[in-house]
Amino acid sequence: MSPRIKIELDDLTANNLGILRRINSVVLPTTYGDAWYKESLAVGQLVKLAYFNDIPVGAIRCASETRNGQASIYIMTLAVLAPYRRYGVGKQLIQHIEEEAKRTYVKEVYAHVWVENGEALSWYQKVGFEQAELVEGYYRKMNPPGNAFVVRKRIE
Ligand SMILES: CC(C)(COP(=O)(O)OP(=O)(O)OC[C@H]1O[C@@H](n2cnc3c(N)ncnc32)[C@H](O)[C@@H]1OP(=O)(O)O)[C@@H](O)C(=O)NCCC(=O)NCCS
């Protein structure tokens, strides 16, 4: 990475919540409501904003889940503004979540990715996620409903 590029992560607070909202609305097709953003303030280290030379350019928001006694971290949103992609911002965000999984003894991080989003599927593969099951009709609001692949990474 060029020494002139500085990538830093920051906590989400009531004062910068608008940044998460802005980045998600510019990058992602799904809209999240006020309740979701309010809830984002209560997930601790499972949400982060990313700054590229002090400019807010990316964000990740996850949720912790327990199913059949197994804890996992679910990536709800991950977004980097298009002009700032391929500089390592997404990787830094996902690495933070993986470290958080390790710190809290969580063994799996996973996400759903729209089957047509080849860019995201290949990105997740690049950062060590495996493509798992197909979930038909996962994106119910799409017309016709969109299918998703689960992508997951085991955390050792
Ligand atoms: C997916 C996304 C978050 C990646 O962010 P990014 O900041 O560009 O990713 P990085 O620069 O950290 O990429 C990490 C590595 O993957 C590589 N890479 C980047 N995009 C890639 C792609 N589409 N396919 C394969 N590899 C890719 C990078 O070159 C880098 O490789 P390196 O470690 O060898 O240098 C970003 O493209 C994005 O916001 N996309 C739109 C929203 C989206 O699809 N979100 C995910 C689904 S919820």
Image (tube, rainbow, N blue to C red):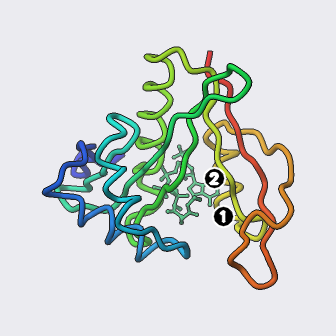
Taking the image in four quarters, ligand 1 sits in the one at bottom right
Residue receiving disc 2: 123
From the Cβ of disc 2, is ligand 1 less than 8 Å away? yes
Pointer 1 residue Cβ closer than 8 Å to ligand 1: yes
Whether the residues at callouts 2 and 1 have beta carbons within 8 Å, the answer is: yes
Residue visible at 79% across and 76% down?
A: 145
Residue appearing at x 55%, y 46% in the figure: 75
Total marks shown come to: 2
Q: Which residue is mark 1?
A: 119
- Tell me which amino acid carries mark 1: Glu
Rendered location of residue 138, percent (x, y): 76, 63
- The percent position of residue 131, horizontal first and vertical second, equals 79, 45
Whether 103 is drawn above or below 2: the answer is above
Locate the N terminus by quadrant.
top left
Q: Residue at x 55, y 76 (%)?
A: 29
Query: Which residue is at the far bottom?
Result: 143
